[in-house]
Image (spheres, rainbow, N blue to C red):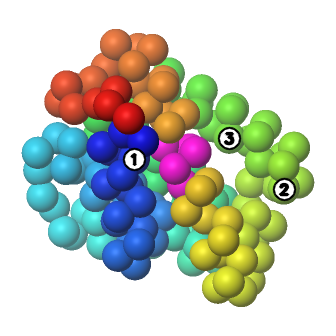
Amino acid sequence: MTKDVERLHKLLLEGNCCSAALVQLALELRGEDNPQLVQAAGALCLGVRHGALCGAVTGTALLLELLCPQYADQLIPELMDWFLAMTAARYGSANCRDIAGEGPLKRKLTCPGLVVEVYEKARELLLEYGCDPTGSFSTEQ
């Protein structure tokens, strides 16, 4: 497991919701701190607090914009195409309520793995585009 994925796991275990954890990770990778931005990103959690589009992908879109703004116009649609296809096949929908249900137990079982999976796809895209602005994407296991 890479150091950035380990950090993402830790942020989730500390109680950060999906979108907020992803934005916090992006800021840390950039060597920055912005609690207000992390707090604002939390509005996207639980499907924009309404069970709609999954916060793992909306938070990852923010991460891509923060880490590679010069290619975000290409990266985010690629991420979305992958995510929509993957969640349609696996869950029947990209909506939080369909992926994680209404109860906290199913969310605890489903969401952390999905957040990491979406982040790893974003990481793959970032590297594919030659965009590692911090040089911090470790390949250490």
Disc nearer the start of the sequence (1/3) = 1
Give the amino acid at mark 3. Phe
Q: Where on the picture, by quarter, is residue 47?
A: bottom right
The answer to whether the residue labelled 2 contacts the one labelled 1, judged by CB atoms less than 8 Å apart, is: no
The answer to whether the residue labelled 1 contacts the one labelled 3, judged by CB atoms less than 8 Å apart, is: no
**Local crowd size for mark 1, using a 10 Å CA cut-off: few (<14), some (14–19), many (≥20):** some
Mark 1 to mark 3 CA distance (whole Å): 19 Å
Give the amino acid at mark 2. Tyr
The answer to whether the residue labelled 2 contacts the one labelled 3, judged by CB atoms less than 8 Å apart, is: no
Residue labelled with disc 2: 91
Q: Residue at x 41, y 72 (%)?
A: 13
Residue 83 circle label: 3
Rendered view: 50 above or below 134 = below
Identify the image quadrant of the N terminus: top left
**Magenta part, dominant SS:** helix
Is residue 101 shown left or right of residue 138? right
**Local crowd size for mark 3, using a 10 Å CA cut-off: few (<14), some (14–19), many (≥20):** many
**Local crowd size for mark 2, using a 10 Å CA cut-off: few (<14), some (14–19), many (≥20):** some
Q: Magenta segment, which residues?
A: 115-119
Give the amino acid at mark 1. Val
Instruction: Say if residue 130 shows up in the picture.
Output: yes
Residue labelled with disc 1: 5
Q: Nearer the viewer, residue 68 or 4?
A: 4
x%, y% of residue 102? Answer: 74, 83
